[in-house]
Image (cartoon, helix red, strand yellow):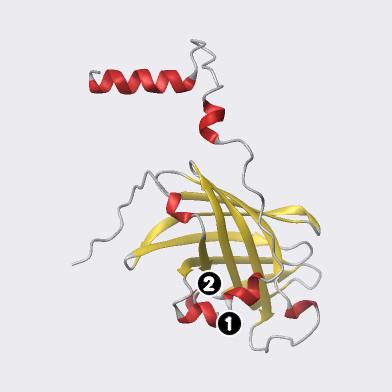
């Protein structure tokens, strides 16, 4: 019998170079038009490529394609192409997630909050967010992982596009130029003046009796 993932994971580094999408049951989202004071259902397919991870922080690219519920995806025009965003996130050892999505075409940021939850024999990212400038779209979803060997990789639910087609032309942020361990080596405690790196080593040696 395969064990389910543990509730607390100290290392989420496996997130690097993973791909995520919205499964069919999580596609519906709710859009509000303030000028008409009306609500309408839309279909929201979003793909993430997490390109990097360091010590609880991760980044990458997010692409979203929206269409009105009950209507076909437009073959041309703005609504036929995914919207691309740079993605910056953090995840705690307990799996709490905070994401920021930024576009060069808009000065406003979209914030997503959620958590990593056991899903089958792996993990899902249970996320909530609200996006849009004039009209607002509220969406919660279980983001699940996809791989080149899986059917969803070639045909995503709700849009029929492949992951490669969704991500075409998107560009993820560059990884940090300075390694985090090198940065920590320069930081000092404001109380003791001891470098944090040396403090951690002293604590570890004390715990092991070395």
| Number of on-image labels | 2
Q: Earlier in the sequence, mark 2 or mark 1?
A: 2
Left or right: residue 88 versus residue 169 is left
- x and y, in percent, of residue 25 in the image: 48, 77
| Contact? badges 2 and 1 (CB < 8 Å) | yes
Compared with 121, 79 (above or below) is below
Residue 5: horizontal and vertical position, in percent? 31, 57
Q: Quadrant of residue 139?
A: bottom right
Q: Which residue is mark 1?
A: 158
Q: Residue at x 61, y 74 (%)?
A: 164
**Foreground pick, 40 / 125:** 125
Left or right relative to 171: residue 52: left
Q: Residues within 10 Å of mark 1 (few under 14, many from 20)?
A: many
Can I make out residue 85 in this image? yes
Instruction: Give the farthest residue toward the top.
Output: 192
Element at label 1: loop
Q: Residues within 10 Å of mark 2 (few under 14, many from 20)?
A: many
Quarter containing the C terminus:
top left
- Mark pair 2, 1: CA separation: 9 Å
Tag 2 residue: 22
Q: Quadrant of the N terminus?
A: bottom left
Residue 7 in the image, given as x and y percentages of width and height: 33, 51
């Amino acid at each position: 019998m395969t064990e389910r993932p543990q509730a607390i994971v100290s290392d989420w580094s496996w997130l690097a170079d993973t791909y995520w999408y919205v499964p069919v049951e999580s596609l519906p989202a709710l859009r509000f038009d303030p000028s008409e004071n009306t609500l309408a259902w839309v279909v929201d397919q979003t793909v993430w490529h997490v390109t990097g991870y360091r010590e609880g922080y991760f980044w990458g690219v997010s692409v979203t394609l929206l269409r009105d519920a009950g209507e076909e995806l437009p073959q041309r025009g703005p609504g036929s192409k995914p919207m691309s965003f740079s993605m910056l996130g953090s995840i705690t050892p307990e799996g709490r997630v905070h994401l920021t999505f930024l576009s060069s075409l808009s000065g406003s940021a979209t914030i997503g909050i959620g958590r990593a939850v056991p899903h089958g024999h792996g993990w899902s990212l249970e996320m909530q967010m609200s996006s849009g400038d004039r009209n607002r779209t509220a969406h919660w979803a279980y983001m699940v992982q996809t791989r080149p060997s899986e059917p969803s990789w070639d045909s995503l639910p709700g849009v029929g596009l492949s992951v490669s087609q969704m991500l075409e032309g998107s560009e993820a942020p560059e990884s940090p130029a300075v390694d985090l361990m090198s940065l920590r080596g320069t930081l000092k405690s404001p109380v003791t003046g001891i470098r944090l790196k040396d403090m951690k080593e002293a604590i570890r040696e004390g715990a092991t009796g070395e």
